[in-house]
Image (tube, rainbow, N blue to C red):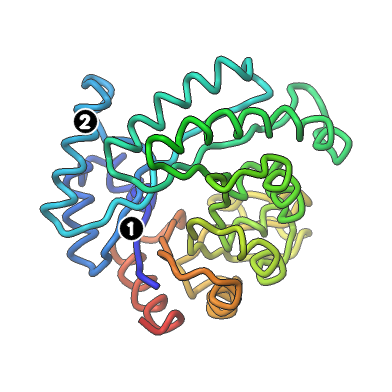
Amino acid sequence: MKLGVSSYSWSRYISEGKLDMFGVIKATAEIGFTGIEFTDLGPGSKDKDPIEAAKEIKAACAEAGLEILSWTIGADFLRNDVEAEIDRLKGQVDIAATLGAPSMRHDATGGFPDRANNLSDFIEALPIVAKGYAGVTKYAVDKGVKTMIENHGFFFQDSNRLEALLNKVDHPNFGVLIDIGNFLCADEEPTQAVKRLAPYAFHVHAKDFHIKCPASDPGEGWFRSRGGVPLRGAIVGHGNVDTKRCIELLKEGGYDGYLSIEFEGMEDNRRALQIGFANLQRYAGV
């Protein structure tokens, strides 16, 4: 396994103007990561042609010796017309291909507007979302880009729901981005969920969370899981996720790709990634 990082992990530095995306690329390489994935093309990119901006990012990563791992963007097949959303996402596949990213993660949906979005709603949504993912991934095949769903966004987050979608789409170019921490947002134990989904993994996020009992009121910096459990982003290895065991289960399931840190805690970005990088090296034996 190799170690990478999501550009999202540098969000505070970017929002505070400490680093632009080219600074993020340089800092990522300095820590020792060999790969990076992108959630956007950086401050100021909205004023540029996205394909040209992607070319600049690709060149900067090549100069820094970083592999580009994935392109990550939003989507919603329930709140938007499915065909229109497929067409829009085809343009995002073109950006991923320009970056040279082997994979692209896009969202499924946040759920039906003005509904409880319970299990019966999921069952209704499944064929609609599957149609969307199938349309995108069939286009992406010819671009050399695999497409993925991540356990993210509460509605399509449980491992059994993702497995149902993967089987519904049933295409070799479509898999899952396993975020080992995000299962907690759906009140699912990470090691059990990772074991279920490991055979479908195209990419993996190493993420950690601190957990408190549901009755607590920890204040600023925390959010609640679907079932009301307080969670806060943690440095990899500092939280409650059994990261080492998750990595073992991924290996047992046949995964030998990148582990990419996605940090969303309150600590300093650079220090958090330095510590997380060192911990992942030990856990993964790299």
Disc number at residue 269? 1
In percent of the image, x 59 and y 53: which residue is there? 222
96 with respect to 206 (left or right)? left
Query: Residue 232: image x %, image y %?
Result: 56, 58
Q: Is residue 75 above or below residue 277?
A: above
Q: Which residue is mark 2?
A: 53
The amino acid marked with disc number 2 is Ala
Q: Does dot 2 land on a helix, a strand or a loop?
A: helix
User: In the rendered image, which quarter is residue 107 located in?
Assistant: top right
User: In the rendered image, which quarter is residue 209 located in?
Assistant: bottom right
Closest to the observer, 95 or 226? 95
201 with respect to 146 (left or right)? right
Q: Does the residue at mark 1 contact the one at mark 2 (Cβ under 8 Å)?
A: no
Quadrant of the drawing holding the C terminus: bottom left
Closest to the observer, 84 or 245? 84
The tally of labels here is 2
Query: Residue 31: image x %, image y %?
Result: 23, 67
- Answer with mark 1 or mark 2, whichever residue precedes in sequence: 2
